[in-house]
């Protein structure tokens, strides 16, 4: 099933997040998988942890960044799909 803005995403329990100077590293302690995030990716990760649901995440990002909405949605869903594929987050909760 394709990821949509109606989905909620949660951080996998064994994942550790460390931020330094606006960038971050995410590490799954169970699998050893790690992932680096730039400043915007770090902001997305923070919003996912705060909201879970992707719609409020994209709404916040649209207010904070001057970017085409379609591009923002595509980039957000691609990043979240990648995080899920690497076992760092997972789709959870009910669809809105």
Image (cartoon, rainbow, N blue to C red):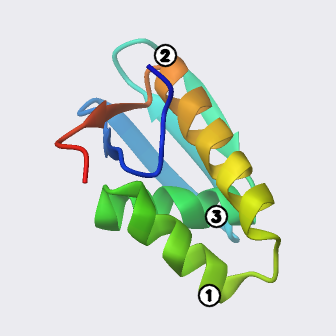
Q: For the residue labelled by badge 1, is the local secondary structure a helix, a strand or a loop?
A: helix
Q: For the residue labelled by badge 2, is the local secondary structure a helix, a strand or a loop?
A: loop
Is residue 68 at least partly visible in the picture? yes
Q: Which residue is mark 1?
A: 63
Task: Say which quadrant the N terminus sits in.
Answer: top left
- Note whether 83 is above or below 49 in the view shown: above
Q: Residue at x 51, y 76 (%)?
A: 59
Q: Quadrant of residue 66?
A: bottom right
Q: Are marks 3 and 2 in contact (CB under 8 Å)?
A: no
Horizontal and vertical percent position of residue 58: 54, 67
Which callout, 2 or 1, points at the residue further toward the start of the chain?
2
- Note whether 56 is above or below 77 in the view shown: below
Q: Nearer the viewer, residue 69 or 19?
A: 69
Q: Which residue is mark 3?
A: 20
Task: Say which quadrant the C terminus sits in.
Answer: bottom left
* Left-right relation of 20 to 51: right
Q: CA distance from mark 3 to mark 2?
A: 20 Å
Is residue 86 at least partly visible in the picture? no
Q: Nearer the viewer, residue 69 or 76?
A: 69
- Note whether 62 is above or below 79 in the view shown: below
Q: Nearer the viewer, mark 2 or mark 1?
A: 1
Q: Nearer the viewer, residue 17 or 1?
A: 1
Q: Which mark is residue 32?
A: 2
Q: Residue at x 61, y 28 (%)?
A: 82
Q: Which residue reaches farthest left?
A: 94
Q: Residue at x 31, y 56 (%)?
A: 52
Q: CA distance from mark 3 to mark 1?
A: 24 Å
Q: Residue at x 66, y 86 (%)?
A: 64
Horizontal and vertical percent position of residue 18: 51, 53
| Badge 3: residue crowd in 10 Å (few <14, some 14–19, many ≥20) | few
Which callout, 3 or 2, points at the residue further toward the start of the chain?
3
């Amino acid at each position: 099933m394709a990821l949509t803005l109606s989905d909620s995403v949660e951080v996998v329990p064994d994942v550790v997040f460390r931020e330094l100077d606006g960038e971050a590293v995410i590490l799954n302690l169970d699998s050893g998988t790690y992932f680096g995030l730039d400043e915007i990716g770090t902001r997305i990760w923070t919003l996912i942890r705060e909201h879970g649901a992707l719609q409020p995440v994209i709404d916040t990002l649209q207010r904070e960044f001057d970017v085409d909405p379609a591009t923002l949605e595509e980039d957000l869903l691609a990043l979240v799909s990648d995080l899920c594929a690497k076992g760092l987050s997972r789709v959870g909760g009910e669809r809105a």
